[in-house]
Image (cartoon, helix red, strand yellow):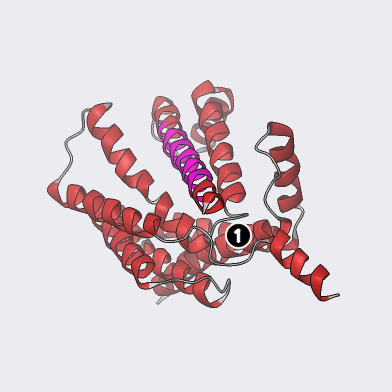
Amino acid sequence: MASEKRLRIKTLIMVLAMVVCAVTGDLLLKRGMSEAGAVEFTGAGLGHTLVHTATSGMIWLGILFLLGFMASQMTVMSWADYSYVMPAGAFGYALQTFFAVVVLHEVVSTKRWIGVFLISIGVVLVGQTKPRTTECAEQVAEKAAASC
Amino acid sequence: MLTVLLLFVLICGSTGGEIAISHGAKKTGEPKRMRPRELLVFIGQVMSNGWFLLGIPLMAASFFALLILFSWHPLSFVIPISALSYVVGALGAKYLLKEEVNTARWVGVLLVCAGVALVAAG
């Protein structure tokens, strides 16, 4: 029972890290690319964008956060179900909407609020289920050793 | 017809790639401790796993399909349809990864799918 609780807590922490890294990374990339202006599909335009992206601290920070997202996703999927992590990660859409309203002062449509509400209910429902329903690598190895 | 094919590549490529990486991560086994050194070793092990190497081209194909679809259709068309990947992912988890997807998880996945479609359309 204690190990079940521990598993749930560490999964929740990693999913949260995953969502925060993805949302922050996207936000930083958006800010960084907006500073560069609209991409022009000419030799000079593409060259300007390339130089800007390679020298923008905002974009490098965004990439760092997205690497953090990938690392936390791989780590959590080493013990938790894919069908648990994938919908739980969608909570990022709700967080993005929250940031859009609070930080960017954007007006959010009713349709989007309904979407956020549905995602939140869905994430809560998935969160009630067991994070892991298959055997982990250690359990498989133990069983194989016991059968020898 | 080409749009349907690209949507298929988009949805199946991303879910197939994630399922392959998830399988590779499970085969590697979870890191013993959550310390930076152990995590880096774990990530290195996952990245040298064959399943990870299968997952990356699938996800790359999905990404290029997304870029092409964005150049042909509005975002409000592409993203709501791509939300179907939650349902395809749950099916893949059930039949390929042999995960136990119970009713509560199915309802949750369907609500998330509908929610993402509405957020993108709104």
- For disc 1, the marked residue is B22
Q: Where is residue A37? Give x, y as percent.
A: 39, 29
Q: Vertical placement of B8 versus A57: above or below?
A: below
Foreground residue, B79 or B88? B88
Q: Vertical placement of A20 versus A124: above or below?
A: above
* Amino acid type of the residue that numbered disc 1 sits on in the rendered structure: Ser
Q: Vertical placement of A135 versus B79: above or below?
A: below
In which quadrant of the rendered view does residue B71 lie?
bottom left
Which secondary structure lies at badge 1? Answer: helix
**Disc 1 residue crowd, few under 14, some 14–19, many 20+, Cα 10 Å:** many
Q: Which residues are magenta?
A: A8-27
**Quarter in which the N terminus of chain B is drawn:** bottom left
Kindly give the residue lying farthest to the right in the view shown. Answer: A148
Would residue B76 be visible to someone looking at this image? no
Residue at 51% over, 64% down: B15
For the stretch drawn in magenta, what is the main secondary structure? Answer: helix
Residue at 18% over, 52% down: A114
